[in-house]
Image: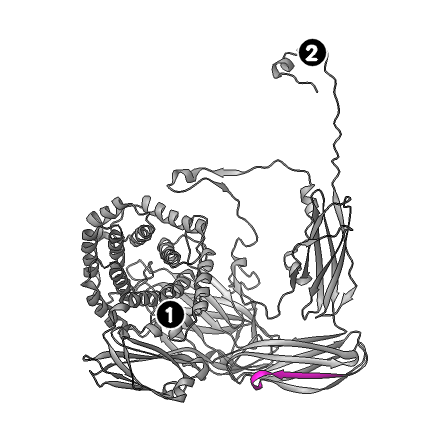
Amino acid sequence: VMLYRPMDIANKRMPRRSIGVKWLKMDMAPRTLQVRLDLPERVRSGERLDIPVSLDGLGAGEEARLVIAAVDVGILNLTGYKPPAPEGWFYAQRQMGAEIRDLYGRLIDGMNAARGRIRTGGDGMGGMAMKGSPPTTKPVALFSGIVRVGADGKARVAFDLPEFNGTLKMMAVAWSKTRLGHGARDLIVRDPLVLTVSAPRFLTLGDKARLLVELHNVEGEAGDYGLEVQGENGMAERSGTVRLARGARHAESVSLVAKRIGKTRVRVRVSGPGGLAIERRIDLDVQPPARDIRRQSRQVLAARRGAITLSRDLLADLIPERSRVTVTVGPLARLDVPGLLLALDRYPYGCAEQTTSRALPLLYLSSLSERVGIRGKADIARRVQKAIDRLFEMQDQTGAFGLWGPGGDLWLTAYVTDFLTRAKEQGYSVPVRPFTQALDRLQNHVAYASDFKRGGESIAYALYVLARNGRAPVGDLRYYADTKLDAFATPLAKAQIGAALAMYGDKTRAARVFRAAMAALPEKEASRGMRYDYGSRLRDGAALLTLAAETRAVPELAPRLTEVVAAARETLARTSTQENAWLLLAAHALMKETRSTVLEIDGKAQKGTLMRSLTAQSLAEAPVRITNRSPAPVHAVVTVTGDATTPEPPVQSGFRVERAYYTLDGKQVDLASAAGGEATLSQNDRLVVVLKVEETQPLGGRVLLVDRLPAGLEIENPRLVDSGDVKSLPWLKTTLYPEHLAFRDDRFEAAFEVRPPRRANPVPAAFSVAYIVRAVTPGRFLHPPATVEDMYRPERFARTASGSLTVKEVR
């Protein structure tokens, strides 16, 4: 080995003699393992598959491990997945690496330097972000876990194959301390007789559909095969014999009738020569024609003698097993706690605000939820933890949360972080790193916020959440309380500043700020226009009541606020998830102050507010009579929530929605079922569904559009179609792209943020969206309505009529 200094080389002064060189021989040849899977050419579904595995290339006494996966080839083909070959990566020649390091974050308080990452891919335009229903057939993806290989280089792995006909890709990876290898083979899984069952993905009560059963005797014996179809709740029934020669096919239609609501299973069994027994199970969800019917009655029970009686007549026109009566009697009855819990529990959508609003009250009202029959304690804990995990999926790299996915909505970020803080205080598992990122984002927002003359809602909420976590700058709180309090636009923002000061022990300032917040609460809703903090007068009042009761900074405010909030609640027939969540938090904060009420329920005395949920079955067994034995009158609220057998009529309140159908070349189809009449399509017809929405007043808002499908139709292209999305349909134009879209088996969803107009003569917003459907299942189906609603001003909504659609079979 000869060593030279650079200057010697440059001046050509290299020594004439060199020391002896001893060459070091290194074995650079890749050390691979040959993995052999000894598989048969074909196996039957439902069998136990025993796989012998052999490894070639192991050294004497060398230990090795392996893993095997068996995955449906159809799943792998969706993404062009290749079997893993780790030796190709580990033994490959390396290219010089290059990284980007972002130091800009060091300029921001609380942020650390982070490696920059290029974020590109096929989902860049949001196509992969679309959400759909899970598959009706369970996907086959089996995994062995780590298996130890014997000293002879052999191992055995077993899988229990499910009901499946197709090809599995068997993939194995093996390794030792010095070697790597992989192996892959295709395995055909097929019964001698292939049974295929085609069914709709769901049904609506009263629907009549066709179940198609197809038999293909690939290599079974010729003879008679028994065919039996049995559906729960009287949905389907057929039994008989089919004679099949080898290679023959047979198709048979069985009628399905949706007679009862809920999950229903249909079993198809085939038996034949040689002990052949094959079974397929189809799970169908039978849905109600009309959902989420809500009725409410309020009354005052006179002192010492006022009474109400609850009977099954309250549910006379509703589906018994899907309906419930809640009753509240006492000082908090006007808030209707059980009804609010049920409303949140039944809300079917899942943006970040709605996910938070559904889970937040359960942190404190789990025992009440169990008592009114909504959820058990274990289930409530699972729901809250699931909500926590779901919310972190909507967090971006800065720590902020978005409404329908990662984004930078700072008020919403504070709301979500408030829930996460409270969940952490209640003992739930909250991941430290993303939670700290959320707090860092709020802290940076406060530290670098611009001065404002009117607004500040997100700043106030951020300071409150930081104070609850011991991270709020006290100087900023005092500055805003002493100098900028009038600039905060909402009573809630002022109250959050006051609550943060109370947490730090500054009771004097906190009391002053709370009184200012109370004074800022308007006597009535001045305008139900769009608010970027998701609020309303009712929400602000309920949140102000919650914070005042929790901090007890101004004890005399609670009774006054309770009256204001209860009165506001009574004026609204429909409330938003944001209003419901804060009303429940307010009720929890006041719960201890309602023990003076004395009631009699069916002759038994009870003290304190009565909150109870009753089913149709319990009311059928015996009516419930509630009598007020208190020396003062008390309020009673009865809420009926459920599903109906009769579709609801069309309605327009703040919106108009129209539903039309077109051929792919733009010709309108007169599909009368979309507007309440009857219509017929042929199997495999493809149509474009166009939904047009108009405001009746130019208010803007966060708008949710839902189009429920007839069970005979399936969404073929869930993307919204416009001139830039589907080039083959240039006649379609959309005026507003959605914040969120999802396609389910039973409905299409799209959410929009309609900005409020800013000009002197505003024009109501109007926009249209579209998607493609195909007529798939023959039968007669209810054509449900399309609905549109402002999620945070729920009194603004519209609904089309329901009709009847027939899909004819094409032979």
Residue holding disc 1: 367
Quadrant in the picture for residue 756: bottom left
Instruction: Please tell me whether residue 636 is drawn above or below residue 357 in the rendered image.
Output: below
The stretch drawn in magenta includes residue 228: yes
Q: CA distance from mark 1 to mark 2?
A: 89 Å
Front tag of 1 and 2? 1
Viewer can see residue 438: yes
Q: Which residues are magenta?
A: 225-234
Instruction: Please tell me whether residue 331 is drawn above or below residue 553 in the rendered image.
Output: below
The answer to whether mark 1 and mark 2 are in CB contact below 8 A is: no
Asked if residue 760 lies left or right of residue 519, the reply is right
Relative depth, front residue between 537 and 188: 188
Residue holding disc 2: 15
Q: Main secondary structure of the magenta part?
A: strand
Mark nearer the N terminus (1 vs 2): 2
Sort mark 2 into few (<14), some (14-19) or many (20+) by Cα contacts within 10 Å: few
Relative depth, front residue between 557 and 131: 557
The stretch drawn in magenta includes residue 746: no
Tell me, for residue 167, which label it has, or none.
Answer: none
Give how far across and how far down residue 382 sits, in percent: 46, 65
Residue type, label 2: Pro
Residue type, label 1: Ser
Quadrant in the picture for residue 13: top right
